[in-house]
Image (cartoon, helix red, strand yellow):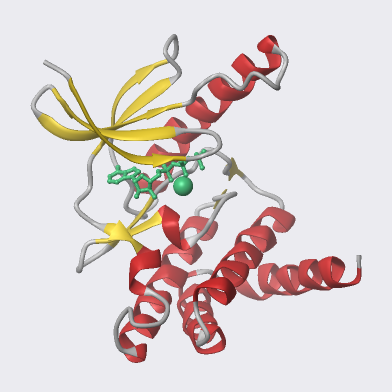
Amino acid sequence: MDRPGRILAEGAEARVSEEEFLGVPAVRKVRPEKAYRPGDLDRRLRLERIRTEVRLLREARRAGVATPLVLDVDEDAFSLVLERLPGRPLTEFLGPGAGPLPKQEGLCRQWGALLGRLHASRISHGDLTASNVLWDGERLTLLDLSLGSRDPEVEELGIDLHLVEEDLNTLSAEAPRLLEAFRSGYEATFPGAPESQARAQEIRGRIRYA
Ligand SMILES: Nc1ncnc2c1ncn2[C@@H]1O[C@H](COP(=O)(O)OP(=O)(O)OP(=O)(O)O)[C@@H](O)[C@H]1O
Ligand SMILES: [Mg+2]
């Protein structure tokens, strides 16, 4: 039987809790109703995000980017059941006191390589922060693709890079070195890196002078 468990995250758009699904360790991700959005629009948005997440989790995995397997989808309940992965969010391994700097740089290089593989497979993430990447001591897994797109414009690739940079800046005083490591991993796996990096820089400029 399915058994509800501990809540792992309760964000603006989704609630994630642990459960057993047909005997397998799983997490259930539910998108609750948002009363401030008109009902039809709200239902449409929630369904769209669930469908996007299911599709991109599968496509990313096929492209060699590890993601959790989707075990069940219940559109009537606006929920997904995903394989529960053993890792912890990358946020816990970056930042002050989270381990030696070279180790953090190594993780950021792997994180960059992961995003490069995603972009090289023509998928953008849309909400890429360190809390959407899990590290299990051996490999990184990518979560939370509900805002991603297939065949993204270079703008969307630039936004992914910009979000990573902002996130590292808030997480760590060593952000410049961590970003450098991130970039080297990204460039190693994505031939289009110069173009998306240039766009990220342009986005930063736009925000600064807006
Ligand atoms: N498959 C999984 N295995 C283990 N932990 C998970 C898994 N999926 C999610 N989590 C945990 O739950 C947290 C929130 O999950 P997720 O990022 O998918 O949702 P969210 O950020 O609340 O949703 P969204 O941004 O799509 O509205 C993650 O940061 C992670 O700690
Ligand atoms: Mg998330």
Indicate the quadrant containing the C terminus: top left, top right, bottom left or bottom right: bottom right
Give how far across and how far down residue 199 sits, in percent: 75, 68
Residue 10, placed above or below residue 164: above
Residue 21, placed above or below residue 82: above
Give how far across and how far down residue 198 sits, in percent: 74, 74
Residue 146, placed above or below residue 124: above
Q: Quadrant of residue 164?
A: bottom right
- Relative to 195, is 87 on the left or the right? left
Query: Which of 100 and 52 lies nearest the eye of the viewer?
Result: 100
Q: Residue at x 58, y 41 (%)?
A: 147
Q: Quadrant of residue 74?
A: top left
Give how far across and how far down residue 141 sits, in percent: 33, 55
Query: Which of 173 and 59 lies nearest the eye of the viewer?
Result: 173
- Relative to 40, is 19 on the left or the right? left
Query: Which of 122 and 174 lies nearest the eye of the viewer?
Result: 174
Q: Residue at x 60, y 72 (%)?
A: 165
- Relative to 174, is 209 on the left or the right? right
Q: Residue at x 43, y 57 (%)?
A: 131
Q: Residue at x 54, y 83 (%)?
A: 175
Considering every residue shown, the one lying at the far right of the view is 210
Query: Which of 76 and 139 lies nearest the eye of the viewer?
Result: 76
Give how far across and how far down residue 52 sits, in percent: 52, 32
Considering every residue shown, the one lying at the far left of the view is 23
Indicate the quadrant containing the N terminus: top left, top right, bottom left or bottom right: top left
Q: Quadrant of residue 137?
A: bottom left
**Number of marks present in the image shown:** 0
